[in-house]
Image (spheres, grey):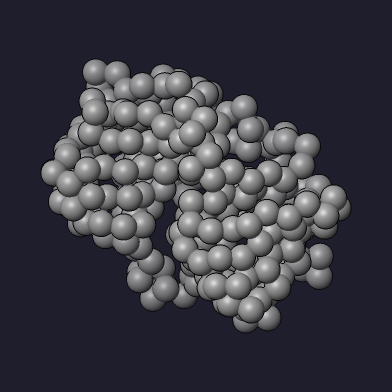
Amino acid sequence: MMFVRTLDEVRREGRELRLLDGAARSARLLTAADGLGFSLHDVGIEAGAEVTLWYKNHWEPNYIVSGAGTVEDLTTGERWPLGPGSLYTVGPTDRHRVTVTETLHVVSVFSPSIMGDERHDADGSYPPTGPVPAGRERMFVKSVGEMRAAGREKIVAGGSARTVRMLLAEDGIGVTICDVTLAAGNRNELWYKHHWEANYILEGEGDVTDLTTGERWPLEPGTMYCVGPEDRHAMHAVTELHLLSVFCPALAGDEMHDADGALASSGPVPPGPPGDG
């Protein structure tokens, strides 16, 4: 069944860790125990930090919510600026350095999922937690603006939402990441029969309702709701809502919602939380 978590709850449960000699915090909202096929973390990295990382055993897409800095590929020397709407993705071959000029707020996704208690080793990596997706040859960076200009923004859910599909099946990471906006007053009914979807609210207010049980939860920044194959649900945007949506399995990118509010099957569906379905 669908479930909802908030950043405050995760912090109260002791699931926010201080990492990288105190320069970063990571609130682990989704972990391997949830069975969605990926982890999702709310991360902060302090201004002035310079951290070197190497995720030998994972792919990690990172969406920049706010702040500024750079990421550098330490093998090639290529460097990219980071700002709101940037998505940088690193994998097993990518020793990289993140330099922070203005405190970064990041939503970080790991594929495969991590357990939730990991800390970086001397190389800046985490222990293996499962098969690593094939991915691309090297790290890459995209932005919402670039993807919009490339025609990757779609009007979906009966016209109620705009989505920029930033990471697709062709990227080989195992997940799709979308930057989604719903206009104030819009309401949609959805049913992701063939996917798990985690939605993390970045801006705005609204609510989400489980159409089977009638249970309703408020949505605000720092709230995550997760829905899967059993979960007919309705979303309502009280104000304009801006959220980050993660699908597993990954989407091809051209999918549109059918009459039930579903997207076409795109691969094996993760099992979901223990006891679900």
| Quadrant, the N terminus | top left
Which of these two is toward me, 38 or 50? 50
Residue sitting nearer the eye, 40 or 144: 144
Quadrant location of residue 132? top right
Q: Report the side of 76 relative to 260 (left or right).
A: right
The picture places residue 151, in percent across and down from the top left corner, at 47, 27
Left or right position of 224 against 267: left
What's the residue at 78%, 37% (across, down)? 137
Query: Which quadrant of the view contains residue 17?
Result: bottom right
Q: Residue furthest bottom?
A: 22
Q: Residue at x 23, y 33 (%)?
A: 160
Q: Return the x and y of residue 174 as percentages of the image width and height.
A: 59, 36
Asked if 215 appears above or below 24 in the picture, the reply is: above
Can residue 138 be seen here? The reply is yes
Instruction: Using the image, determine if residue 197 lies above or below residue 85.
Output: above
Q: Residue at x 23, y 25 (%)?
A: 158
Which percent across, then down, holds residue 97?
A: 74, 63
* Residue 212 relative to residue 8: left or right: left
